[in-house]
Image (spheres, rainbow, N blue to C red):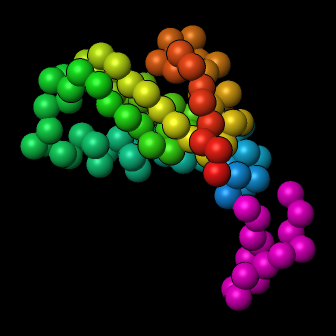
Amino acid sequence: MDFNNVDRRNSPTVPARTGYGEWASTHEESVPKQLDIRVLESLKALDWSAAKECLDLACGTGRIGEWLKAQGVATIDGIDLTPQMLEWGSRAPDSWLSECIPSSS
């Protein structure tokens, strides 16, 4: 990663696609599942098993899609800016990702 560009806090900045692309291989180890899964599980007004179709925006490595599948959602489509995240997610043996289509912008 090139850290020549920094923000006002002197923190390195890179384009989102670049940063997430480089983060893909370590994403699952560096982000606790409790951060996103706990939020989904707290949404008591939603009956996930009644959902026939779902769109996972910014699906990344597919962690949310995997959770949705376990809740009984039949069809899940995912889109992400980063091909590396999609590729990493499709490596899981029981991945819900059948076709990985990165967004174009």
Q: Position of residue 83 (x, y in %)?
A: 69, 36
On the question of residue 29 being in view, the answer is no
Task: Please report the residue visible at 60 percent of the width from the left and 30 percent of the height from the top.
Answer: 101
73 left or right, relative to 96 = left
Magenta highlight on residue 101? no
Task: Please report the residue visible at 43 percent of the width from the left and 27 percent of the height from the top.
Answer: 77
Q: Quadrant of residue 44?
A: top left
Q: Residue furthest top?
A: 93
Task: Please report the residue visible at 15 percent of the width from the left and 23 percent of the height from the top.
Answer: 50
On the question of residue 57 being in view, the answer is yes
Q: Position of residue 6 (x, y in %)?
A: 79, 78
Q: Quadrant of the N terminus?
A: bottom right
70 left or right, relative to 96 = left
Q: Position of residue 72 (x, y in %)?
A: 25, 18
19 relative to 92, above or below: below
Stretch in magenta: 1-15
41 left or right, relative to 88 = left
Q: Nearer the viewer, residue 99 or 67?
A: 99
Dominant SS of magenta comes to: loop
8 relative to 86, above or below: below
Magenta highlight on residue 14? yes
Q: Position of residue 34 (x, y in %)?
A: 39, 45
